[in-house]
Each structure stands twice: as C-alpha cells, then as structure tokens.
C-alpha cells in the first residue's frame, strides 16, 4: 500500500487549524476533528491515562479518557507512548488498530508517532502558547523535525506576513532502497543521516528540514539560499565506514513562495506536485512549480474529468504492434497498446498515461485493455483465425491489490481464452516496487500458465535481482540499449552490454525480445547476438484491429 503523504499533510494541517479553536480536549468537537486522520491512519481507538511520575507506584491523577473510538478496536494491536510534563505527571497514550485489515505499515507507524506528539500538545495546555515547540519532537533516527513542524512554521510565517521571503522544496533520495539492499539497513540509515546533516549545516536561522516519511523530506529555506540548497540536493558524495563513499542524489520539487500565500497546505501541495511531475512526467532531477506546471495541472484535471465517460463510451481503442521472429520474419505475437479517440481527435498516450498513473485510474484502464484484448482473441478463435499471444501492460500500481490475480483470471476466463494466449507485461518494475508483492503475482500467473514479462529492462536503475529471483518468461530490453549505426561504430561498449544482457537472459531460461527496432543494421546486430525476437517500426507500427487481423490472415495463409 502506497502512503499518500500529500493527502495526509492536508488532513494534518486542517487538524492543526481546527485544534487551535478548541479550549478543552474533552470537548466533543475534539473527537470530531480527530476522526478524518484516524480513518486515514486506520486508528480505531485513542485513549490516555495520567499518572504521578514522582511515585514508584502508578497513582492515577485523572480518569482514563477516550479521545476517539469507532467501536471496532483490537486491544492486541496497539501502539503505546509515554509523555512526561512539567507538572510531575506521566501520560500514557494508546492507539489501537481495528480488528480487521492489514497491520500498520512502517510509514503509518511513523506518522502515528508524530501525531501522538501533536495530540499531547493540545491536551497539555501548559505548552499551548508555543505549539511549534511541541511539534518539534525530533525524528528518532535522524534527529530532525517531522512534517508537522514544517506546516506550523509556514503557518507562523504567513501570520507574520513574511512567507514571501522563503521557498520550499520536497525531495526524495533516489534509489535509497538499493542503498538499503547493498549496505544493510543500519548502514543505509547512517548514510541518510550524514546526507541530511549536511543539509542542516547549510540552512540558516528560521530555515528547517523536516522528514515527511521514509526517504522523503521537505526544506523551508530563505530565497537567497536557493542555490546552496539546490547544489547540495543535486548530488553529494557521502563518506562512511572509514573511507567508503557513495554519491547520494535526489529528485526535488521547488516552489518560491509568494507573499499572498494563505495556507501551509498550498505550499505543501505545490512542492509535492512539482516533485511528482519531476519524477513521473518530466523525468528531471528537479522542477520548479511555475505557470507551466499550473497549465499542466489544469490539463491533469481535464483528463481526470474526461476519463470516466471515455471508459463508458469505449473511446480507448486497442492497437496491436506485431512481434516478429527474426529467423523467418513470421508473426510471433503482439503487444496491445492504447489509443484514445475523442471528438475526432487522438489524445497521445504521453498526455494521458502519466495522469492516470498519478490517480491510479491507470488500473481501471489496464483491466479495460485486458478485457478488450480477450474479447478480440475470443472472436478470432470463434472465426477460425490463427490467434497469437498478446502481451498486455499492467502498471506496478496494481501491486498491493490482494485480488489482482483473481481479477486477471476473471477477465480471461469470462471469454474462455486459453491462458497461453495472454502475456502480462508488468511495467515500471525496476523502481520503487514491493518485491514481495511482485513475486507473489509473478508466481501466481505462472501457475496459471500465463506468461509474464519484465517491461523496459535497462531503464532507470534496473536490478539484476529482478530477473534472478522471479520466474519471468520474457525479458523485454528497452530500445535505449539498442545502438544506432553511429553508436555501434563509435561506442563498442554499448554493443557488448546488449550482447551480455541477451546472453544472460537466455542462460537464465528467459525469452528475450528487443523493442524499438528501426533499421536493417539493428536487425543484423540482434541476429549476431542470437536474439531472434523483436518489435519496432522497422517491421510494423501499432495497428488498429482490422489491419492486425489482415496480418493474422497473411501469417496463416
């Protein structure tokens, strides 16, 4: 399950705003403002009891109090915290999970720990005059502020009319999971700590760095200090373990905050939006929130609004790009690709796919495509055509869906399509995936005689563990690994890399296909490398159904 930090920060800011209006934590209104965050963090019950901390025995100084209870709490699934205050009292807080549902994730536990500090702030009014001070409880691992402090600091600067002096940045440490795998958790945490402490040495009075969760952080900085922060986040060698060095880089979203800003949530929205676009759309190491992004956001909203009716009206059409067997140039299969036709115009996949991935609507589109592919295959079989195996893309955002395998099988079996005609092409599997969930679905599909392939191997930070530890059927090599004639002449290392990947995949028992083949020279190179399966414009562009059916007839005849 992916933790939605953007939505959580908005709820947290609303809680802070409404909490300041409440004078007494026993006020029923306090329970009401707790409810949205409790539902988001899957908290079923919050309670506390106050004791005299000067005595060895537990002397209760006030009756136990229940802040929130939805009636479904499980007393065996509980997080407990203890707070000491200046009045020689000790407060024990209990957060219980519901009787149903998965255990809290690590991200949820981190946010519950920070949320407990915030509740304690409101409950102990001796600290209420300086809420920001109570929000500044250090992160246990890194000894830095949590997100709540960032929001409170921004809010305070807005009150003072000084927010226009500052900028904000949301950043993520790239490939930190790989650092974790390579060096171990303790060492990786130390590397993160050294990197973050390096930023702390750069920031000035009134600036701050705060942890959002995991390997995500935010920084509030003076605008004059922008270049120093930006240069540091672009990449920094970190030395650890008596001289060993690793370069830590980030993906970052910046926002130069205008004086007219009215809420901390607006700042958080803009820096997190810039970060998401830098990572997923523009593929850049950093991006500033500006007019271009505002236009992009307008475009995103338009796509999101059009999508439900487009699905209902079947505006998305399946195009089939043939796969070719190089030893005889026969049709060997196809990949199903999506094209959107609306009001007589074609909307490019580059315009709508990233948007749908951002809202998880991509999962709906994936199942729509699988359904239409199965419908076509069933029709071909009923008409006596020679059908071929078709690969259908599935986004990594499906991972974590406990019913994913059943949903795939339900669609395929609805049309009584033999399983060997379907190949599931899992996209974006080289970054930020839960390997346990990925392994589960790959094994499950294999047991059902459904082929699986790794899409775009070689893009980004591909892990060899990805193909070593899972029973894939097909390795799809990205076109970036396929050299042009000029590169083949001037960069022999690229040819060697391609040759080694093909040999390695075949030694592991994987079928190997290269996409993006455009020239006869590239075909010859693949044959020389003993790779005999390819797709690309040299053979065929993606074809509408009728044209692909003609291809099927030609192949059969």
Image (cartoon, rainbow, N blue to C red):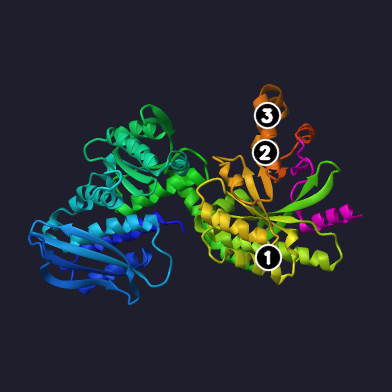
Q: How far apart are marks 1 and 2 (CA)?
A: 34 Å
Which of labels 1 and 2 is toward the front?
Answer: 2
Residue 495 vs 327, above or below: the answer is: above
Outermost residue toward the top in this view? 490
Marked residue nearer the N-terminal end (1 or 2) = 1
Q: Which mark is residue 496?
A: 3
Between tags 3 and 2, which lies in front?
2
Q: Which of marks 3 and 2 is nearer the N terminus?
A: 3
| Element on which disc 1 rests | helix
Residue 234 forms part of the magenta stretch: no
At mark 2, the secondary structure is helix
* Residue 305 percent across, percent down from the top left: 53, 62
Residue sitting at 60 percent across and 48 percent down? 350
Q: Which of 344 and 350 is in front in this view?
A: 350
Q: Which of marks 1 and 3 is in front?
A: 3
Q: Measured along the vertical axis of the image, is residue 353 above or below residue 69?
A: above
Q: Which of 134 and 273 is in front in this view?
A: 134
Task: Tell me which corner region of the image, top left, top right, bottom left or bottom right, holds residue 475.
Answer: top right
Identify the residue shown where x is 15% and y is 68%.
Answer: 24
Residue 200 on image: x %, y %: 28, 36
Residue range corresponding to the magenta coloring: 530-557
Q: Residue at x 29, y 61 (%)?
A: 14
Return the disc, 1 or 3, that comes first in the chain's sequence: 1
- Name the residue that disc number 2 marks: 504
Q: How far apart are marks 3 and 2 (CA)?
A: 12 Å
Classify residue 342 by image quadrant: bottom right
Q: Find residue 199 and report its horizontal and vertical position in percent.
A: 31, 35
The answer to the question of whether label 3 and label 2 lie on touching residues, with beta carbons closer than 8 A, is no
Asked whether residue 23 appears in the rendered view, the answer is no
Label 1, on which residue?
371
Spatial CA distance of label 1 from label 3 is: 40 Å
Asked if the stretch drawn in magenta spans residue 553, the answer is: yes
């Amino acid at each position: 399950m992916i933790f939605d930090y953007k939505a959580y920060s908005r709820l947290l800011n609303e809680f802070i705003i409404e909490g300041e209006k409440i004078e007494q934590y026993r006020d029923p209104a306090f329970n009401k403002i707790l409810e949205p965050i409790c539902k988001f963090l899957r908290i079923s019950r919050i309670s506390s009891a106050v004791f005299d901390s000067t005595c060895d025995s537990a002397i209760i100084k006030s009756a136990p109090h229940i802040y929130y209870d939805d009636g479904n709490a499980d007393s065996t699934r509980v997080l407990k915290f203890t707070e000491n205050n200046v009045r020689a009292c000790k407060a024990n807080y209990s957060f219980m999970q519901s009787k149903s549902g998965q255990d809290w994730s690590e991200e949820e536990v981190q946010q519950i720990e920070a949320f407990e500090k915030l509740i304690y702030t409101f409950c102990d009014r001796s600290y209420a005059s300086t809420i920001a001070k109570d929000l500044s409880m250090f992160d246990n691992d890194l000894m830095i502020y949590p997100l709540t402090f960032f929001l409170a600091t921004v809010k305070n600067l807005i009150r003072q009319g000084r927010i226009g002096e500052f900028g904000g940045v949301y950043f993520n440490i790239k490939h930190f999971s790989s650092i974790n795998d390579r060096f171990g958790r303790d060492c990786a945490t130390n590397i993160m700590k050294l990197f973050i402490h390096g930023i702390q040495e750069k920031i000035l009075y009134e600036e701050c760095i705060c942890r959002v969760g995991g390997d995500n952080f935010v920084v509030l900085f003076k605008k004059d200090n922008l270049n120093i922060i930006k240069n540091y986040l672009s990449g920094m060698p970190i030395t650890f373990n008596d001289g060993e060095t690793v370069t830590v880089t980030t993906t970052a979203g910046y926002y130069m905050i205008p004086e007219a800003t009215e809420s901390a949530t607006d700042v958080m929205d803009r820096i997190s939006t810039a970060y998401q676009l830098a990572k997923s759309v523009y593929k850049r190491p950093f991006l500033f929130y500006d007019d271009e992004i505002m236009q992009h956001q307008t475009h995103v909203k338009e796509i999101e609004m059009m999508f439900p009716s487009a699905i209902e009206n079947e505006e998305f059409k399946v195009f089939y790009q043939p796969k070719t067997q190089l030893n005889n140039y026969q049709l060997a299969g196809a990949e199903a690709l999506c094209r959107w036709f609306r009001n007589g115009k074609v909307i490019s996949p580059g315009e709508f796919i990233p948007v749908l991935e951002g809202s998880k609507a991509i999962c709906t589109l994936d199942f729509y495509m699988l359904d239409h592919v199965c419908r076509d295959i069933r029709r071909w079989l009923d008409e006596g055509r020679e059908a071929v195996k078709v690969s259908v893309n599935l986004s990594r955002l499906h991972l974590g869906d406990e019913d994913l395998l059943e949903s795939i099988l339900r669609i395929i079996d609805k049309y009584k399509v033999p399983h060997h005609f379907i190949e599931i092409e899992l996209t974006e599997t080289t970054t930020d995936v839960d390997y346990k969930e990925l392994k589960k679905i790959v094994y499950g599909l294999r047991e059902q005689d459904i082929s699986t392939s790794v899409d775009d191997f070689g893009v980004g930070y591909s892990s060899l563990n990805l193909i070593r530890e899972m029973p894939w059927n097909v390795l799809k090599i990205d076109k970036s690994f396929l050299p042009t004639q000029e590169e083949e002449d001037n960069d022999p290392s690229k040819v060697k890399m391609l040759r080694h990947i093909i040999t390695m995949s075949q030694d592991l028992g994987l079928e190997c296909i290269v996409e993006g083949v455009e020239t006869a020279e590239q075909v010859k190179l693949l044959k020389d490398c003993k790779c005999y399966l390819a797709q690309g414009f040299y053979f065929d562009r993606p074809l509408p159904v009728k044209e692909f059916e003609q291809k099927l007839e030609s192949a059969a005849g």
